[in-house]
């Protein structure tokens, strides 16, 4: 489970509130995997929500970074593009399988949850928090240096 | 199960300007998700029908709540109310209008004063 803390906060309320939505829903996916309450339908619904919400949130965040001429804007945009393309690829893979067994569905969901949520967390800490620096909410020395590749 | 009602006034980023009826953390989550839904719906309607949405209403049966979403003209804010479905319809309308008027006058007071 990802727990909200200062370590992942950007200090920018509109960005933090949207990150909390993504984290809450990745945690919901993990909870469903652990409690064995995952179904094909609720997984599909959750993945689609996460994908669409991430797309919307990234757009908002990119506008904010561009508006403040943030040094991280271009890197942030490239990472978003990579994530959406990877997420879409995984979602298409999910829909293409016609004969999911329960075991396979749980295994696939756990792998996907790990990959997508770990990437998101790294991205928030290593890239998004620099937006907080640009907006004067965080000090540069409080944030680890950005990295081009996160996976 | 019927829940008690709640309401929030949110901006286009999903941030709460005002609200009451639920713990802050829960209202914040609703605000962020519902704003995303409203803007997505609005975008789809505009792309398909070249028109805007003036009001959205829906019911969440399991919780016994009736939702109303009302945009506040040029302010870019939305009023979202959730009222118990066992409340008389007239009272729901009255309470929603009361909150809408209150939000409108609040928005007016937030606008910068024009220099004379």
Image: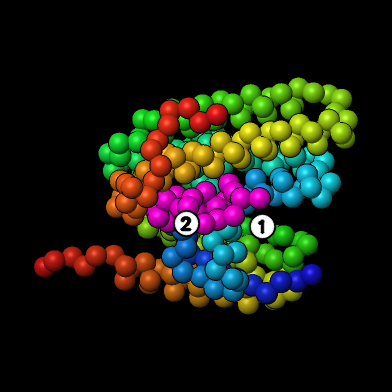
Label 2 crowd (10 A; few <14 / some 14-19 / many >=20):
few
Labels 1 and 2 share a subunit: no
In the image, residue A128 sits, relative to residue B84, either above or below, namely above
Check residue A12 for magenta coloring.
yes
Please give the residue where the numbered disc 2 appears in the rendered image.
A6
Q: Output the chain of dot 1.
A: B
Query: In the figure, is residue A58 to the left or right of A26?
Result: left
Query: In the figure, is residue A114 to the left or right of A84?
Result: right
What is the x, y in percent for residue B34?
Answer: 57, 53
What is the x, y in percent for residue A141?
Answer: 33, 47
Please give the residue where the numbered disc 1 appears in the rendered image.
B58
Q: Secondary structure at mark 1?
A: strand
The disc placed on residue B99 is none
Label 1 crowd (10 A; few <14 / some 14-19 / many >=20):
few
Q: Can the viewer see residue B53 in this picture? A: no
Q: CA distance from mark 1 to mark 2?
A: 36 Å
Q: Is B110 in front, or is B51?
A: B110
Q: Secondary structure at mark 2?
A: loop
Q: Residue at image x 76%, y 22%?
A: A96
Q: Residue at image x 83%, y 30%?
A: A104
What is the x, y in percent for residue A8?
Answer: 49, 50
* Colour approach in the figure: rainbow
* Residue B59, quarter of the rendered image: bottom right
Q: Is B13 in front, or is A61?
A: A61
Q: Output the chain of dot 2.
A: A
Q: Furthest-left residue in view?
A: B116
Q: Can the viewer see residue A87 in this picture? A: yes
What is the x, y in percent for residue A124?
Answer: 48, 43
In the image, residue A143 sits, relative to residue B3, either above or below, namely above
Q: Residue at image x 55%, y 29%?
A: A151
- Magenta span of residues: A1-23
């Amino acid at each position: 489970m990802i727990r909200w803390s200062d370590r992942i906060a950007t200090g920018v309320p509109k960005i933090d509130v949207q990150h909390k939505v993504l984290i809450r829903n990745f945690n919901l996916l993990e909870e469903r995997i652990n409690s064995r309450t995952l179904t094909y339908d609720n997984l599909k619904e959750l993945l689609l929500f996460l994908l669409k919400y991430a797309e919307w949130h990234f757009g908002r965040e990119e506008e904010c970074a561009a508006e403040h001429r943030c040094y991280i804007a271009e890197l942030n945009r490239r990472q978003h593009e990579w994530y959406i393309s990877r997420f879409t690829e995984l979602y298409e893979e999910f829909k293409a399988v016609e004969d999911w067994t329960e075991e396979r569905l749980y295994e696939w969901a756990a792998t996907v949850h790990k990959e997508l949520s770990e990437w998101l967390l790294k991205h928030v800490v290593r890239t998004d928090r620099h937006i907080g620096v640009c907006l004067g909410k965080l000090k540069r020395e409080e944030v680890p240096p950005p990295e081009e590749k996160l996976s | 199960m019927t829940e008690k009602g709640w309401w929030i006034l949110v901006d286009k980023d999903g941030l709460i300007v005002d609200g009451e009826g639920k713990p802050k953390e829960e209202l914040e989550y609703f605000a962020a998700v519902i704003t995303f839904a409203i803007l997505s719906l609005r975008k789809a309607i505009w792309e398909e029908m070249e028109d805007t949405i003036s009001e959205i209403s829906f019911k969440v049966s399991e919780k016994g709540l009736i939702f109303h979403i009302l945009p506040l003209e040029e302010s870019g804010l939305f009023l979202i109310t959730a009222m118990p479905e066992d409340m008389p319809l007239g009272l729901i309308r009255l309470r929603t209008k009361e909150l809408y008027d209150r939000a409108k006058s609040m928005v007016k007071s937030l606008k910068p004063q024009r220099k004379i």
